Image: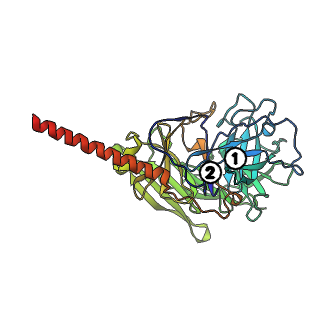
């Protein structure tokens, strides 16, 4: 077992006919985890003493990347153990642990409502079960205290909350933080819970300067929160990123503007994530009234310079039309349609993942070829949204997680081009070429007879 896993909101998988699959060696550097993790077995409703008793009750079933792995959380760590939700949500990830949000049934999965009901739990200290079960790991869970008191604001939204472990502590020292910036308010609020403390704390911070906007007349809503380089990065895909260190006694909010984006109407076309130890911004874009084949996938990398200066540089790009013409894409049997972004490979920024027709596939943009194609039918859960317009299915339903060192120490990272997918795609492409050649030969013979 090595590196990264992915969790995603997919309550069922249906096997379909198609490409042959072979199991690769169990050596993974990353995994894709179900955003809505399994509710798990029936744990008792007794509270645990977080400082003394840490039974290994969290189960992780690691699937071969980029297939979806499954996380199981005991019922007693849910908001209402006697009536737990079936599929709690993996709200945030750090290389040393996961932050899970749970609620009472019938709540299920991702809830994008303001102030969602439920509570948080931190899952950490994952260890492999043993050589007899190479795909299995266990971890411990810790309940996070509720927000109490009139001075601590309620949760604005699950996508506003981030999770970060302190460097050098092996995940034992961690912070959970939410950034709230209201239009017209003079100060921003950073709401933080630190491990080893009994309650949440609120810091009121100076707003960062945002180009082209009055400092008091803009609000901030997060699309995601990323743990990277000792900071939390609060992402607004239309405005930029705000970074800060929640472990600092005097945190400073710093704004980083995103590249100008031309959206494609009605589709989630942007993500921000970490790949190869750098912060990346991925977009699907197309000039207005241009043909669909000219739709472009672009990966940008954030370059941080001296004196807190930063800028974005193009990492790689590809036209969808070129990808559609590649034999590996034709071998998947997928239509020539604009896909939905699902993520970027944690160690290969050229490799971007997409959803299309409930299938997950990965494309090497530099080579313009399909590297991974998951021949399984994923039915993603719709997020619960009552207070705003319904969000389309996207990367919000999955969580890419770089596995902690305890799960891949001494192992070799699985290649981005592993044979079980790429080899099958090439085999399928060769079969299609033979069929096309036979058809042309038959048509030529018929033409000669006529």
| Residue corresponding to mark 2 | 5
- Look at the image and tell me whether residue 371 can be seen: no
Foreground residue among 381 and 137: 137
Residue at screen point 59% across, 43% down? 396
| Residue corresponding to mark 1 | 60
Rendered image quadrant of residue 449:
top left
Would you say 221 lies left or right of 73 here? left
Rendered image quadrant of residue 150:
top right
Would you say 27 lies left or right of 167 here? left
- Look at the image and tell me whether residue 423 can be seen: yes
Badge 1 marks a residue whose secondary structure is strand
Count of marks, rendered view: 2
- Residue 125's mark? none
Badge 2 marks a residue whose secondary structure is strand
Task: Return the residue found at the far top.
Answer: 106
Image quadrant containing the N terminus:
bottom right
Q: Which of marks 2 and 1 is nearer the N terminus?
A: 2
Task: Return the residue found at the far bottom.
Answer: 306
Would you say 51 lies left or right of 268 here? right
Q: Depth-wise, is mark 2 or mark 1 nearer the camera?
A: 1
Q: Do the residues labelled 2 and 1 touch (CB within 8 Å)?
A: yes
Residue at screen point 87% across, 43% down? 48
- In the image, residue 278 sits, relative to residue 184, either above or below, namely below
Foreground residue among 55 and 295: 55
Local crowd at mark 1 within 10 Å, few (<14), some, or many (≥20)?
many
Residue at screen point 15% across, 36% down? 446
């Amino acid at each position: 077992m090595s590196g990264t896993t992915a969790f995603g909101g997919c309550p069922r998988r249906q096997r379909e006919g198609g490409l042959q699959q072979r199991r690769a060696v169990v050596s993974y550097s990353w995994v894709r985890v179900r955003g809505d993790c399994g509710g798990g077995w029936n744990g008792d409703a007794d509270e645990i003493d977080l400082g003394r008793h840490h039974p290994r009750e969290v189960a992780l079933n690691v699937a071969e990347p980029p297939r979806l792995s499954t996380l199981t959380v005991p019922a007693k760590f849910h908001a209402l153990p006697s009536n737990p939700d079936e599929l709690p949500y993996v709200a945030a990830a750090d290389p040393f642990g996961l932050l899970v949000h749970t609620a009472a049934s019938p709540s299920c999965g991702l809830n994008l409502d303001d102030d969602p009901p439920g509570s948080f739990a931190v899952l950490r200290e994952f260890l492999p079960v043993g050589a007899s079960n190479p795909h299995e790991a266990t971890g411990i869970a810790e309940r996070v205290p509720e927000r109490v008191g009139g001075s601590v604001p309620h949760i604005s939204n699950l996508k506003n909350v981030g999770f970060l472990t302190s460097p050098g502590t092996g995940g034992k020292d961690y912070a959970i933080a939410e950034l709230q910036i209201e239009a017209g308010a003079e100060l921003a609020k950073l709401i933080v819970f630190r491990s080893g403390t009994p309650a949440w704390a609120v810091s009121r911070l100076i707003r960062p300067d945002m180009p082209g906007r009055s400092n008091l007349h803009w609000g901030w809503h997060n699309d995601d929160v990323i743990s990277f380089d000792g900071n939390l990065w609060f992402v607004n895909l239309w405005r930029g990123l705000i970074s800060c260190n929640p472990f600092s006694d005097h945190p400073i909010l710093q704004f980083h503007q995103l590249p100008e984006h031309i959206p494609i109407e009605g589709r989630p076309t942007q993500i921000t994530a970490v790949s190869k130890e750098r912060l990346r911004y991925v977009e699907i874009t197309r000039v207005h009234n241009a043909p669909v084949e000219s739709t472009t996938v672009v990966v940008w990398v954030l370059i941080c310079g001296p004196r807190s200066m930063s800028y974005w540089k193009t990492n790689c790009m590809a036209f969808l039309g070129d990808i559609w013409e590649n034999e590996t894409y034709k071998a998947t049997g997928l239509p020539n349609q604009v896909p939905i972004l699902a993520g970027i490979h944690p160690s290969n920024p050229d490799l971007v993942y997409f959803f299309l027709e409930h299938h997950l596939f990965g494309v090497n943009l530099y080579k313009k070829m399909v590297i991974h194609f998951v021949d399984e039918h994923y039915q993603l859960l719709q997020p619960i949204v009552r207070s705003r317009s319904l969000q389309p299915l996207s990367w919000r339903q999955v969580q890419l997680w770089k596995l902690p060192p305890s799960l891949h120490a001494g192992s070799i990272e699985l290649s981005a081009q592993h044979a079980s997918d790429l080899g099958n795609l090439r085999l399928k492409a060769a079969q299609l070429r033979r069929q096309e050649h036979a058809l042309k030969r038959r048509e030529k013979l018929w033409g000669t007879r006529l």
